[in-house]
Image: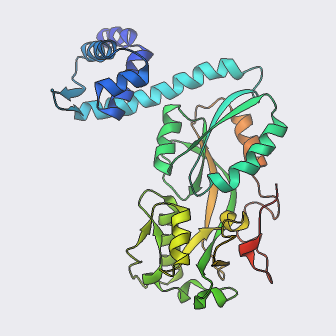
Amino acid sequence: MATVATAASALSVRQLHYLVVLAQTLNFTRAAQRCFVTQSSLSAGIQELERVLGATLFERDRQSVRLTPLGKDMVARAQALLSQVYDFVQAAATAATPLEGVVTLGAIPTIAPFLLPRLLRRMRREFPGLTTLLREAQTQELLQAVEAGDVDFAIIALPMPLGRLLHIPMFTEELWLIAAEDDPLSRLAMPSMSQLDMQRLLLLSEGHCLRDHTLQACQSGRRGRRREPSAIEASSLPTLVQMVEAGLGVALLPEMAVKAGFLVGTRVRARPIAVPAPHRQIALVARPSTTRMQLLERICELAAPSAGPPGVAGARRRRGSDPTQARNQA
């Protein structure tokens, strides 16, 4: 135990940071640039870390750098330690003014353009002493950033495996069907999932959680009739809408995008889906060790939709009008 205690006392936060960054880049030059140190300093830090631990964390030669199996485990542990160190320091910095300072807020691409403008206006009004930094990325990248302490909170869509991260539900929204205006489905006031031809279903590419939510909705809504969706995929929501407009198929779009006027100016129509309508839960995730629970909870309150009770799917349907032209109100 004395040996372990001695090794632990010899570790530094800087060495753990070097370890995590080098594991992300697998390149000493790029890792040094990201750490704002010379390559020799970073290399010496990694060598000292390996010496203290008595283990090899990286395999390196002139052509490549690779993590050893133990190195992969150590990187995960280092990320957890660094996030706790970040929260340790932040606890002191925000103790007196928990709703002031700087917060980094992440959001996935199918949420950020539609929710953040309204949320940020409310946050500026409610927290004049708070500076909000934004980061838009796909779910897994955001979850890793939250875990590492690079992002304080992230707005994502559930269901999604979260590991040890905590989450606070914000509200639930439906997924709406979108089709070209000359598509027979666009003439139905409220189509059902059973009327959807899976082979015409267009999806976002791998990595977008909306892809998974769409597939889950189709599998549950079609009572086990498992047919493959279209092989055509889109890299973003704008591209997805363009593909629908071109008549390549139909897709599911988040309700907040429809209500934000995302389809205005296109020849695409959105229709609410008959009960049971597919939906996703919007949630705010954070580290369990966060010291900013008060701010976390207040952001959740401010993010609630302007109309309709949060947490009720379909509460904001507008029957008798074309929701394609509707816009969110701040």
Residue 63 location, quadrant: top left
Residue 305: horizontal and vertical position, in percent? Answer: 77, 58
Relative to 199, does residue 120 appear above or below in the rendering?
A: above
Residue at screen point 66% across, 81% down: 275
Residue at screen point 29% across, 29% down: 27
In the image, 130: left or right of 212? right
Q: Is residue 76 visible?
A: yes
Residue 170: horizontal and vertical position, in percent? Answer: 70, 53
Q: Nearer the viewer, residue 236 or 307?
A: 236
Residue 187 location, quadrant: bottom right
Q: Quadrant of the C terminus?
A: bottom right
In the image, 321: left or right of 271? right
Q: Nearer the viewer, residue 106 or 301?
A: 106
Q: Quadrant of the N terminus?
A: top left
Q: Is residue 224 visible?
A: no
Q: How is the image coloured?
A: rainbow
Residue 171: horizontal and vertical position, in percent? Answer: 70, 58
